């Protein structure tokens, strides 16, 4: 087998005892892809240090390169690890962008393409055709862009960039994805009039990810008014202006830390994640509270996060609307708990990499579980589970959820564990290392 190749059915390691490990978790997908977009839109070169190198981030880098941006991959001048130097130039077409199944690429880049000179064609995996994009497409048209999308409001599509975009006020319904809001805000400093985005939908998921966008925009010199900074509810304003080239170090991906923390919880062991930030907008930081409620304890120091399981796993009743991407891992732990769980506020997960609510229900139940879908989440009643094949539906977080269950249940085999390459290519090796294998 080639280096890093994994068998079609990966035998999820069963834990023979309590884990005790330090796991260096690679960089955040969400922060890396925002950093790349902002560096590409800046008026001077910048550095992205310790970037995540995974399918989603390499697709983002390739797309920006296709539009004329230079990204030099190498080691930082101080020898502190991998660092990418981003040299912004005039954005131009014609170009083709492969979005894969990356929400950040398919949503964040059409506004960038509207600023390019020439047509930019967007295409991706079959699932990308089904993921919602209308919020971005309709908004860009309102703001002055020309887009051909065969009237489907989805991929594939072509943005006919004219080198500039008017910008201004726009209403969108971002109830199916916070990434619509983030997408418009990220490019807005380069719109002639900036932007005023007004969300008019009933709900808005993943608010920490919007805060991450605002925080990172401000860190490169953008002026952003938000509901939290005294503005109107559900309204974000970005003033036009040049963006600075910065030297940014990417935090570890706290959502990808989830399976490792879960391992401590499930086995009654201890996992240390170095460099866990003491202040962050990453939604994964909420794991400290959620997994504590489910039976663990954590200690956050300057070195990182130490998370310890007690041996007991408790069910939880929780609204996950802010942290939807944590749902598969929480569902996996909940299936092994000593009491039922209700996970709420995550109807939009039906439109993620796969329909995550259906996939989790089916796969956990096929191992003997008792999970039912609700209108906006899952009811999970723990049952004794048995081995079997855990299908992943090309969803990285399904694969890591299956691995969590496999720690406690013998003979779980994960179909296509290689799909973890979307955000965590070394998952099988990191998992084996954590278990001392
Ligand atoms: O902006 C981002 O980086 C993300 C926002 C969220 O998307 P949704 O709001 O579509 O859930 C999250 O689930 C996704 O993994 C990453
Ligand atoms: C929903 C996710 O990804 P995407 O950025 O493709 O939306 C995720 O990583 O859980």
Image (spheres, helix red, strand yellow):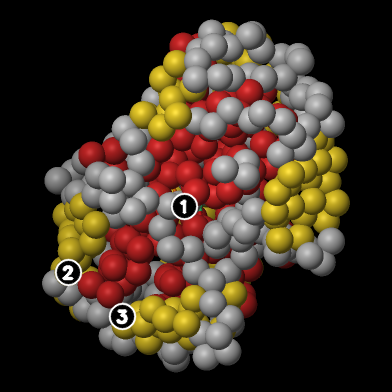
Give the x, y percent position of residue 222.
56, 78
Q: SS class of the residue under badge 2?
A: strand
Alpha carbon separation for disc pair 2 and 1: 31 Å
Alpha carbon separation for disc pair 3 and 1: 28 Å
Tag on residue 76?
Answer: none
Of pointers 3 and 2, the one earlier in the residue sequence: 3
Of pointers 2 and 1, the one earlier in the residue sequence: 2
- Is residue 371 toward the left or the right of residue 72 in the image? right
Quadrant where the N terminus sits is: top left
Relative to 410, residue 147 above or below: below
Crowding at mark 1 (Cα within 10 Å: few <14, some 14-19, many 20+)? some
Relative to 429, residue 295 above or below: above
- Is residue 20 toward the left or the right of residue 428 in the image? right
Give the x, y percent position of residue 369.
56, 11
Relative to 273, residue 401 above or below: above
Q: Label 3 CB, ligand 1: below 8 Å?
A: no
Give the x, y percent position of residue 346.
56, 31
Tag on residue 95?
Answer: 2
Q: Which residue is mark 3?
A: 69
Q: Which residue is mark 1?
A: 426
Residue at image point 58% right, 48% down: 433
Of pointers 3 and 1, the one earlier in the residue sequence: 3
- Is residue 199 toward the left or the right of residue 310 in the image? left
Residue at image point 67% right, 58% down: 281
Quadrant where the C terminus sits is: top right
- For residue 311, say whether it is visible: yes
Q: SS class of the residue under badge 1?
A: loop
Report the mark closest to the observer, 2 or 1.
1
């Amino acid at each position: 087998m080639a280096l890093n190749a994994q068998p079609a059915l990966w035998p999820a390691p069963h834990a023979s005892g309590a884990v005790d490990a330090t796991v260096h978790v690679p960089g955040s997908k969400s922060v890396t892809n925002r950093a790349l977009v902002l560096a590409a839109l800046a008026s001077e070169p910048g550095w992205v240090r310790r970037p995540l190198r995974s399918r989603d981030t390499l697709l983002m880098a390739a797309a920006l390169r296709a539009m004329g941006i230079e990204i030099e991959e190498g080691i930082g001048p101080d020898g502190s690890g991998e660092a990418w130097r981003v040299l912004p130039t005039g954005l131009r077409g014609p170009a083709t962008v492969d979005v894969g199944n990356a929400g950040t690429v398919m949503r964040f880049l059409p506004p960038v393409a509207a600023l390019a000179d020439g047509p930019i064609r967007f295409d991706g995996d079959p699932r990308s055709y089904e993921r919602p994009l209308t919020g971005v497409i309709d908004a860009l048209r309102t703001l002055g862009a020309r887009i051909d999308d065969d009237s489907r409001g989805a991929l594939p599509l072509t943005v006919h960039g004219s080198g500039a975009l008017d910008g201004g006020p726009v209403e969108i319904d971002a109830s199916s994805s916070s990434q619509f809001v983030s997408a418009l805000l990220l490019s807005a400093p380069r719109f002639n009039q900036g932007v005023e985005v007004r969300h008019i939908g009933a709900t808005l998921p993943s608010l920490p990810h919007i805060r991450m966008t605002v925080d990172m925009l401000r860190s490169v010199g953008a002026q952003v008014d938000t509901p939290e900074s005294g503005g109107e509810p559900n309204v974000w304003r970005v003033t036009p202006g040049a963006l600075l080239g910065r030297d940014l170090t990417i935090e570890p991906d706290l959502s990808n830390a989830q399976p490792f923390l879960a391992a401590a919880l499930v086995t009654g062991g201890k996992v240390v994640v170095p460099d866990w930030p003491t202040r962050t907008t990453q939604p994964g930081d909420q794991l400290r509270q959620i997994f504590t409620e489910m039976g663990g304890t954590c200690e956050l120091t300057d070195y990182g996060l130490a998370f310890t399981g007690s041996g007991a796993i408790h069910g939880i009743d929780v609204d996950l609307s802010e942290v939807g991407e944590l749902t598969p891992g929480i569902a996996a732990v909940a299936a092994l708990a000593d009491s039922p769980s209700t996970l709420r506020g995550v109807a939009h997960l039906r439109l993620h990499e796969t329909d995550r609510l259906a996939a989790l229900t089916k796969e956990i139940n096929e191992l003997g579980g008792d999970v039912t879908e609700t209108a906006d989440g899952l009811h999970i009643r723990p049952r004794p589970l048995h081995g079997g094949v855990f299908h992943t539906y090309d969803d990285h977080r399904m694969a890591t959820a299956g691995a969590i269950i496999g720690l406690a249940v013998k003979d779980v085999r994960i179909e296509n564990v290689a799909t973890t390459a979307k955000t965590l290519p070394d998952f099988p090796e990191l998992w084996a290392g954590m278990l001392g294998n």
